[in-house]
Amino acid sequence: MKSKKTDGLTVFLFLLPGLLLFVGILIAPLFMSAYYSFYQWDGLGEKVYVGWGNYKTLSLFKKPDAFAFGVPAMHAAVKHVFILAGLSLVLQLPLSLGLALLLGRGIKGERFFLSVFFLPVLISTTVIGRLWQKIFASEGLANSILTGLGILKEPLNWLAESEGNLLLVAIFIPMLWQYVGYHMLLMYAGVKSVPKELREAAKIDGATNWQVDRYVVIPSMKQVLKVSVIFAVTGSLKSYDLVAVMAPQGIKTQAAAVPSTVLHDFLSNRMKYGIGSAIAMVLIVLCFFFALLINLLFRDRDAKG
Amino acid sequence: MKKFLAAVLALVMVASLCACGGKNNTTATPTPEPIYEGDMTVSMWCIATEKDSNRASYEKAIADLKNMHKNLTLNWEAFENQTYKDKIKTAVQGDSMPDIFFTWSCAFLGDFVKTGRVYCLDDAYKEFANSLDEKMCRNTIYDGHKYGVPLTLNVVVLFANMDILKAAGWNDVPQTYDDLLKCCDDIKAKTGKIPFGCAGGETWCVTEYLEPLMVKNMGGEKLDNVFQAKDTWGNDKIADSVEKLQGMIDKGYFDPAAETLSNGEVQQKFIAGDYAFYQNGSWNCADFAAAKDGEFIKSVKVTEFPVVDSSASKLGELIGGPSDTLAVAASAKHASTVAKYTFELGQLICKYGYLAGSGLPAWKVDYPTDGINELTKKVSEIVNNASYLVLFGDTAMSADTKDIYLEAVAKVFSKQITGANFIAGLKSALQ
């Protein structure tokens, strides 16, 4: 009995530093944000309790008029990140999976290609943002190639905030491009964890490479796929850096707003800590919701199959 | 044991909520202290980064200050403009400010003064009253007390590349608004150049065009009252000014790629001769004087934006004023001594900034000014003849108001709203 108690205490004491860090850095700020979200506060003076008032000003469900200034652009922001999450699922993840499956077959130069595809993940987002700004500039590479090929008659103003949809396309392309390698690496680990014997058995039965991937490898790496989907969706919801670098004005005019940029605007520029905290809470709830939903969807599939 | 551990964890959770509260310092008029003669280390934050036009002024001023006070060790750091705004606000909130910090006047510093964390400079000012006119401190007086040391002052001016104007058939900068529009048409038709350089990608650069239009359309005092929330935004002259700016955009007077350009790029394109006019702050005089090894200045003329409505405004009503300021943290050790050093430093930065042409003097000039470039001299002449200075809108307004205003201005440039929308929206949001 005594040794069990001692063991338990030892385990707890070893976990305590990590637990304190976890609580101090993650849980405590979460509670503090929730607390601030019910107050009107400029970060310097007195806090004024406003209840759900901050949440009501977020205009999540109705797009505010273009000349309703000072209103958090959450309607547009959430729409943009939903589009980005959708594009991640439809474009980014299939591309990552395709590359992982190809490399997982043990092709020549496997390690070299792994490194090359992973490189964008290692580059600073600010550098990537500035690079793609130049690519999408009026006299940049994108316009040069498209006009040279005759696809465009005139160069496009990709990054002009008045060209709302174009601006989003210009921002989403590098965002999707940057993390293809990241998801590819996750999935590659999943591919490599599939026992060789299973592949060989399928091959002996006459399965093609594609059939092996589809019926043996992909089902075996379902948990990895689930993790990738969760990261892709929640990462899209939380996106900030590339948008801030590539379209600082688009954030102001809502053409390229995402929840994190709206949050930063209200916290840092407008010193409205209450509204900023409310936006943070909405973001957390959205991330939680989608993480649970994806878990549920994959669990249903597990139960069926 | 389990209950004990559960209690510890619960205590940690509750403790995190207790950190939500905080007590605010109240403003207290400081008791004057004797000047401290012992060794002291003072910290300072500013925005004079390596590429800032004021960097050299700061370096010379600090060197002079250290020579004047051998007991002083000044540790200073410079941050990029936008980063600095976040950093200093966080520092004020956390009461972890440097002893001396750069700030902008009016509402920006005013928000900090309200927290009681900025040192009152009334007593320290007395020693410098002969060198610093009280009206230069106007923008940093709150509830009748001084809290800031002005450095240089700047105004929005119109730089013109005379080579392009002459090629378009204009030997001088147009003196009236109608002539300016004719000149722009001629520039486009005869030279193929773009009349105005503006970094639409940075909203403050758009205000450098919109605010002079507003002041020359409605008058300095009226606009000043609007910026200071003493008058309504629902003024048809403001809507008219917005429509005029958008009219100029529609006529192709601005670069079609303006929204994607930074101010640095626009400035370089003006120097390269891509634009005929560049309307921006007078701090650009130093850069233009040095451009192309001093050759570019021969092609540049500086003036003010012409009057739009002569019944409401006149020449001499300008956008600008003393905005760059140094302030002292109330938490500074030997604060009254730090305050004295801050005034001395401010005077030196002003002097070197003026001599370098990166700003106009907020302090009295009692040194030779032969080396000042011709552009700065001309701007100095314009300011000396000025009848009214309206501080930049985004400096005059509080943090929240300023951001709403800049959001509206950004939408003006991208043509998302009309002039009527602009005034109605701002009136609704701010009043």
Image (cartoon, rainbow, N blue to C red):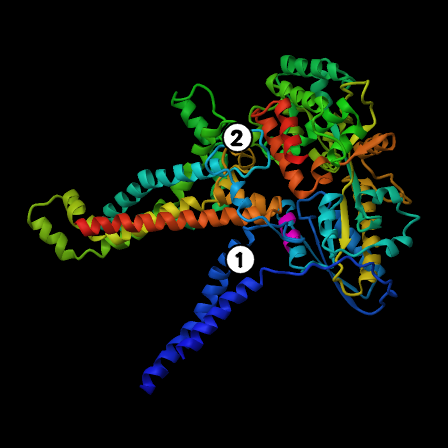
Q: Residue furthest right?
A: B130
Question: Please, is residue B73 above or below residue B59 in the view?
Answer: below
Along the line of sight, the residue nearer the viewer: A150 or B418: B418
Q: Amino acid at mark 2?
A: Glu
Along the line of sight, the residue nearer the viewer: A207 or A29: A29
- Asked which quadrant contains residue B212, the reply is top right
Indicate which disc residue A32 carries. 1
Give the CA separation, mark 2 to mark 1. 35 Å
Residue A280 horizontal side relative to residue B177, left or right: left
Indicate which disc residue A161 carries. 2
Q: Is residue B181 visible?
A: yes
How dense is the environment of label 2, judged by Cα within 10 Å: few (below 14), some, or many (20 and up)? many
Q: What chain does mark 1 sit on? A: A
Residue A157 drawn at (x, y percent):
50, 27
Q: Which portion, as a residue range, is magenta?
A: B85-90
Q: Nearer the viewer, mark 2 or mark 1?
A: 1
Element at badge 1?
Answer: helix
Q: Residue furthest left?
A: A205
How dense is the environment of label 1, judged by Cα within 10 Å: few (below 14), some, or many (20 and up)? some
Residue A126 drawn at (x, y percent):
50, 45
Q: Residue at x 87, y 40 (%)?
A: B369
**Going from the N terminus, do you reach mark 2 or mark 1 first?**
1
